[in-house]
């Protein structure tokens, strides 16, 4: 499993000041993707235990509100184990902080996948759906195109239907 970048202070990918990790590898190849350098599954650097430890140390700062996992595609079958490991470690260490994930897969599709069942239990927010350039809107918060949804995962799992995040 590989990653492309870690941002130790990110204010664009979720609420507040956050730590973000961009996993490596994506098969969607959305037109005008903001991060095409993450498409190659063999690119970036190896995601080692030491890298995850460093990531968790960055999250320990009091001013860090949460962790964001982006890509590439964190929920791709080749990346789901890493996403699950990062999410589980983060929520065990920092249950009071929030965890956001961006995925081209829809929430409904992830719910049907056995390999995604565990990770969904750790997520606070999922921004789902592939980026569609023709639906791009600069006014949208935390997403690039209007087809994407900002989902409150715990509420959605409890209710059995999509609950969008409200401020």
Image (spheres, rainbow, N blue to C red):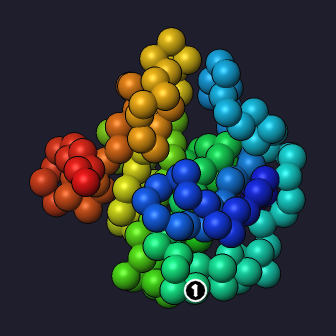
Residue at (37, 56) in percent of width and height: 125
- Say if residue 161 shows up in the picture: yes
**Furthest residue in direction top, as rendered:** 134
Q: How many numbered tags mark residues here?
A: 1
How far across and how far down the image is residue 155, in percent? 20, 58
Give the left or right position of residue 152, taking residue 84 as reference.
left
* Residue 81 visible from this viewpoint: no
Vertical comparison of 32 with 164: above or below: above
**Point 86% across, 59% down: residue:** 45
Residue matched to label 1: 60
Q: Residue 117: image x %, image y %?
A: 39, 58
Q: What secondary structure is marked by label 1?
A: loop
Quadrant containing the N terminus is: bottom right
With respect to residue 160, does 47 lie above or below? Answer: below
Toward the left, the furthest residue is 159
Label 1 CA crowd tier, 10 Å (few <14, some 14–19, many 20+): some
Residue 117 vs residue 28, the one in the foreground: 28
Direction from residue 156 to residue 55 in the image, left or right: right
Displayed quadrant of residue 35: top right
Q: Residue at x 53, y 52 (%)?
A: 13
Q: Quadrant of residue 55?
A: bottom right
Q: Position of residue 20 (x, y in %)?
A: 62, 61
The picture places residue 157, in percent across and down from the top left corner, at 23, 56
Residue 91 to residue 12: above or below: below
Name the quadrant of the C terminus: bottom left
Identify which residue, 38 or 49, lies in the foreground. Answer: 38
């Amino acid at each position: 499993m590989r990653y492309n970048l870690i941002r130790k202070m990110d204010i664009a990918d979720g609420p507040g000041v956050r730590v973000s990790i961009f996993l490596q590898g994506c098969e969607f190849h959305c037109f005008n993707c903001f991060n095409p350098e993450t498409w190659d599954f063999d690119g970036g650097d190896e995601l080692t235990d030491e890298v995850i430890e460093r990531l968790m140390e960055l999250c320990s700062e009091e001013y860090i509100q949460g962790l964001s996992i982006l890509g590439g595609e964190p929920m791709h079958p080749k990346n789901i184990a890493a996403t699950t490991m990062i999410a589980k470690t983060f929520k065990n260490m920092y249950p009071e902080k929030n965890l956001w994930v961006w995925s081209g897969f829809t929430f409904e599709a992830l719910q049907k996948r056995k390999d995604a069942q565990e990770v969904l239990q750790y997520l606070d927010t999922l921004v789902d759906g592939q980026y569609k350039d023709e639906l791009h809107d600069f006014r949208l918060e935390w997403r690039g195109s209007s087809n994407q949804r900002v989902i409150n995962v715990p509420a959605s799992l409890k209710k059995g239907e999509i609950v969008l995040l409200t401020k």
